[in-house]
Image (cartoon, grey):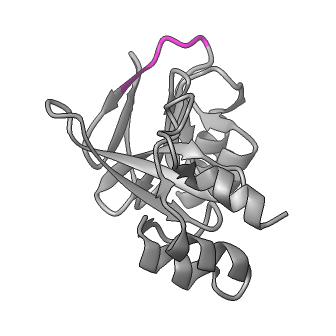
Amino acid sequence: MNLLYTVFLLSGIHHANTQDGVFLSSQSYAMQEVWVVDQKNTQRLVERNDGVRLVSSSCSHLFTSKNAYGYRKGNKAFRFWGKNCFEIINTEGIFIYRLEVDSESSSELYYFSKTANDDLLPMNRKNLKEVYKNEHPVFAESVSLLDWYICLTDSIAPLGKLRIVELFQYCTK
């Protein structure tokens, strides 16, 4: 039965940078291979707090952190972690994720990981310093000393602040 399910599952793999679908693993995310119910794009993704349901006229599949890595909807990619879906907002050098806490008040929390496979940690000075102290000591020390800014959506960081991605790139050259 497992072999039959695996064959069925793999038959839905589709290479498309624009189609909505599910990333079954961090490797499929890296290669931008999404799993889809049908390649005619008649499916729809129903987002939930802890995962996503992929629905077509013939079937429905629920994906969470227990059976998939994440999903793409529109031009955004998301990673499942625990009981939440985190938007992936940066993958250059440091993986940064955003968790929308309350859509009505626009509250957001930021998390990070060194690689696509690593655990997500809350983005704060202590965690950044601990994770990077051996591999990138200049960055780890700079995080403690400089006034940095997390948000990547602003085209220009506030006066006197560095964006964390720019700080990472500068310190790890």
Picture residue at 54% right of the left edge, 42% below the top: 89
Picture residue at 65% right of the left edge, 65% below the top: 115
Residue nearest the observer in this picture, 76 or 43: 76
Picture quadrant of residue 43: top left
- Of the 4 image quadrants, the one containing the C terminus is bottom right
| Type of secondary structure dominating the magenta stretch | loop
> Is there any visible trace of residue 147 in the rendered image?
yes
Query: Picture coordinates of residue 146 (x, y %)?
Result: 54, 66
Picture residue at 53% right of the left edge, 84% below the top: 130
Extreme left residue here?
104
Residue 139 vs residue 173: left or right?
left
Write down the region rendered in magenta. Answer: 40-45
Query: Picture coordinates of residue 80 (x, y %)?
Result: 42, 53
Picture residue at 52% right of the left edge, 48% below the top: 160
Residue 158 vs residue 92: left or right?
left
Query: Picture coordinates of residue 121 (x, y %)?
Result: 43, 70
Q: Is residue 52 above or below residue 76?
A: below
Q: Does residue 162 show up magenta in the picture?
A: no
Query: Picture coordinates of residue 50 (x, y %)?
Result: 28, 49
Picture quadrant of residue 172: bottom right
Extreme bottom residue here?
134
